[in-house]
Amino acid sequence: MSWFNRTDKNIDSKINKDMPSGLWTKCTACSEVIYKTQLEENLFTCPTCNFHFRVGSLEYIEILFDENTFTETNQNVHSVDSLNFVDTKAYTDRLIEVRSKVKVNDALTTGYGKMNGSLVSFACMNFNFIGGSMGSVVGEKFVRAAHYALDQKIPFLMISASGGARMQEAALSLMQMAK
C-alpha cells in the first residue's frame, strides 16, 4: 500500500508559495471566502449575504467621484502632540506609526471633485486612523471643507465614521465640536 504514502510532506506550502497574498477575504457575517476584486466590484458588499464591509476614505473617493477629478486638500495639516501625551506609547510615535500603516495623514480626508459631472466638496472620516477619533485637525479640516463649499456654492458631502474625541489631545479635541 505504498501508493498511500505521501512523498512530499509540504504540498500545502508549495501551493501557497505560488498564490499571492491578499487576493481573498472572508466575510465576517457568513464566512464566505470572496475574491477581493469581486468585493470591490460589488462596492464592498458580500455577494452571498449582503454584509457591508468597512469602507475607507480612499475607497469612497474611488466609488463616488468621476475618474481623475478628485483633488485632496489640506494634506499639510497634521495632528501634533501639544500635551506630550504618553500611554502605552508616546502619542508622537503612535501618529507616525498609524500614518505609515494606513496611508492617510489624519482621521479626516478632505477635498473636492466631480460626482456625475457636478463639483462637490468632500470630507470623510478614516476609521483606521486611531478609530476615526476626532483630534484638533479633524475640526479644522472639516471647517475648511465646509467653507470651500460655501465659497464655491457647491454641495458638501461628509461621511462620518468616528470613534469620538481623541483622548491624547484632551480638551483640544473636545473644542473641535464647536466647529
Image (spheres, grey):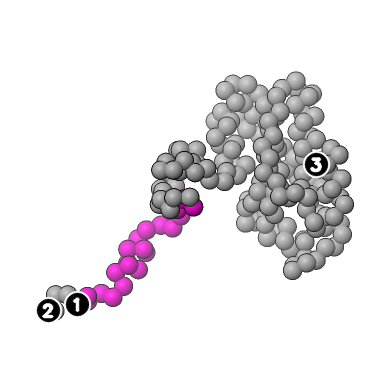
Instruction: Residue 147: name its quadrant.
Output: top right
Seen in the picture, residue 53 relative to 114 is either above or below; the reply is below
Most distant residue in the bottom direction: 2
Which is nearer the eye, 118 or 72? 118
Q: Residue at x 75, y 40 (%)?
A: 74
Residue at 68% across, 60% down: 97
Give, as a three-letter code, the residue at label 2.
Answer: Met
Any part of residue 104 in sight: no
Are circles 1 and 2 on residues that touch, CB within 8 Å?
A: yes
> What is the spatial separation of the Cα atoms under label 1 and label 2, in whole angstroms?
8 Å
In the image, 28: left or right of 146?
left
Secondary structure beneath disc 1? Answer: loop
Q: Quadrant of the C terminus?
A: top right
**Does the segment drawn in magenta span residue 175?**
no
Name the residue nearer the viewer: 164 or 70. 164
Residue 140: x and y in percent read 81, 41
Q: Quadrant of the N terminus?
A: bottom left
Marks 3/2 in contact by CB < 8 Å: the verdict is no
Magenta-colored stretch includes residue 11 = yes
Residue occupying the far left of the picture: 1
Seen at 49% across and 44% down, the residue is 51
- Of 74 and 39, nearer the camera is 39
The magenta span reads 6-28
> Badge 1 is on which residue?
5
Q: Which residue is mark 2?
A: 1
For disc 3, the marked residue is: 139
Q: Residues within 10 Å of mark 3 (few under 14, many from 20)?
A: some
For marks 3 and 1, the one nearer the N-term is 1
Say which quarter of the image contains residue 61.
Answer: top right
The Cα atoms of the two marked residues, 3 and 1, are separated by 66 Å
